[in-house]
Image: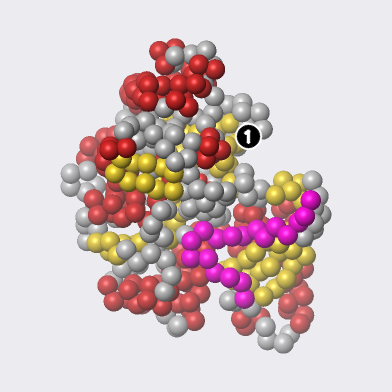
Amino acid sequence: MSRTDPLIEGAFWQRQNEVIERTFLEAEQLHHLKETLDSVYSNVPFYKSRFEKAGLIPGDIRSLGDLRRLPFTTSDDLRAAYPFGMLAVSKEDVVRLHTSSGTTGKPKAIFFSRQDIENSSDLIARCLVMTGTGRGDILQNMMTYGMFTGALVMHYGAEKVGALVIPAGPGNSDRQISFMQDFGVTAFHITPSYALYISSLMQERGIDPGKDLSLKRAYLGAEPYTEETRRKIEYIFGIDVYNCYGLTEMNGPGVAFECMHKNGMHLWEDHFLMEIINPDTGEVLEDGEKGELVLTSLRREAMPLIRYRTRDITRIMPDNCECGRTHRRISRILGRSDDMFIARGVNIFPQQIEQVLMGIKGVAQNYQIVLESFDDITVRAEISKDLFDGNIEHLLDLQTEIADKIRAEIIVKPKVELLEPGALPVSEGKAKRVIDNRTM
Ligand code: ADP
Ligand code: ZN
């Protein structure tokens, strides 16, 4: 791919940050790490006692490698500290509260200072510039506004680069499509599951997104999805899809983002320190090895977190990106350790099943995995309408193909149910893919 990155006026310093030499980057990281450790030690009793238990004071952390001497912070720690226990500044210096969307367990309260808002907007601005969005673009933001960071953080960053932002939120899907038509929307920000739903609705309404709309690119995040799903969405809409990763605890979206090479997401290492660990033992793994992503915020003021276990499974891509950015990349999130389930003793992520489904002709947008026992999985997949033409043979063949291909991927052979498009519930926020009906 020979496309070069666009630069918007005034963003040159941003680009400088992105291609910073690693030695300078690491020196900067160490400086901000020390500041962060001083802050949490002095202001957050939870961290002070953590240091004491480890027999350390912030001054003992002299190199980036020394970070490993500190224990992890977990989402349970955040819940235990609810509501204000993790705050490192006075309440008067907090300007915004977000909570995680609570896909798993009760919400965690995350605070932002004015500078935190500024930094999170800057990072999104960097991501948008990197992928060609700027002044003149019209960005339809179809993520949920509210306690979830997905929409608001993107909103601020997109305004910063001078795009016109339509704060549509999710839902009211016919209106979403009209907005795209009426305002000439060029970019949109959406969950993968909602993008698939919108695409099928467009097809139903006889709209060809490639011809009838001005869309150029989409930013997809908030939930794991596969390369096959990306390709499918790119193909249907005739656009470029960029993967956008983030979590409320670390500002929200824009922690890691794909450049135009679409080969892994650059994790912005001037704001976050990353480690990959073995989720069972806590051992830090080498670049390239798959494990749980652990992040330390380097510049968050209101609520910095040290060695925070994201529960997201990925790996650091060891080679350099062709774009020249020096911030290392992580692979697509392979799954959340919370989503992993075990059937017949095999560890399975829903994305492994999605990858198979999205590669099979005739399989439509939506699917669900139902767990009834510890041995059996049922995969319920919507398929294209024309396959329900009364020809049972076709359906049986497809059913067998799906079951066999999934078995080849995850070892366990699932029961497969084929459904008409629209039969499964559509989620406008994060999709719920696994229905667990098992009782212990
Ligand atoms: P939660 O979903 O845990 O309530 P958040 O709303 O903060 O909390 O969402 C953050 C989580 O969403 C991440 O930890 C990750 O699991 C998931 N996520 C966000 N972006 C992506 C992405 N691009 N690919 C895969 N997963 C993502
Ligand atoms: Zn790159």
Q: What residue is shown at x 21% (from left), y 40% (from top)?
A: 12
| Residue 412: image location, x then y, percent | 78, 54
Q: Which residues are magenta?
A: 423-440
According to the picture, the residue beneath numbered tag 1 turns out to be: 279
Q: What residue is shown at x 47% (from left), y 48% (from top)?
A: 100
**Can residue 425 be seen in the rendering of this structure?**
yes
The one nearer the camera, 82 or 50, is: 82
Quick check: is 427 in the magenta stretch?
A: yes
Relative to 101, 25 lies left or right: left
Q: What residue is shown at x 72% (from left), y 87% (from top)?
A: 390
| Residue 23: image location, x then y, percent | 36, 22
The secondary structure making up most of the magenta span is loop
**Can residue 116 be seen in the rendering of this structure?**
no
| Residue 252: image location, x then y, percent | 41, 46
Is the residue marked by circle 1 packed among few (<14), some (14-19), or many (20+) residues within 10 Å? Answer: some
Above or below for 375 versus 185: above
The one nearer the camera, 397 or 440, is: 440
| Residue 263: image location, x then y, percent | 47, 46
The one nearer the camera, 259 or 111, is: 111
Q: What residue is shown at x 73% (from left), y 78% (from top)?
A: 394
* Amino acid type for the residue under numbered disc 1: Pro
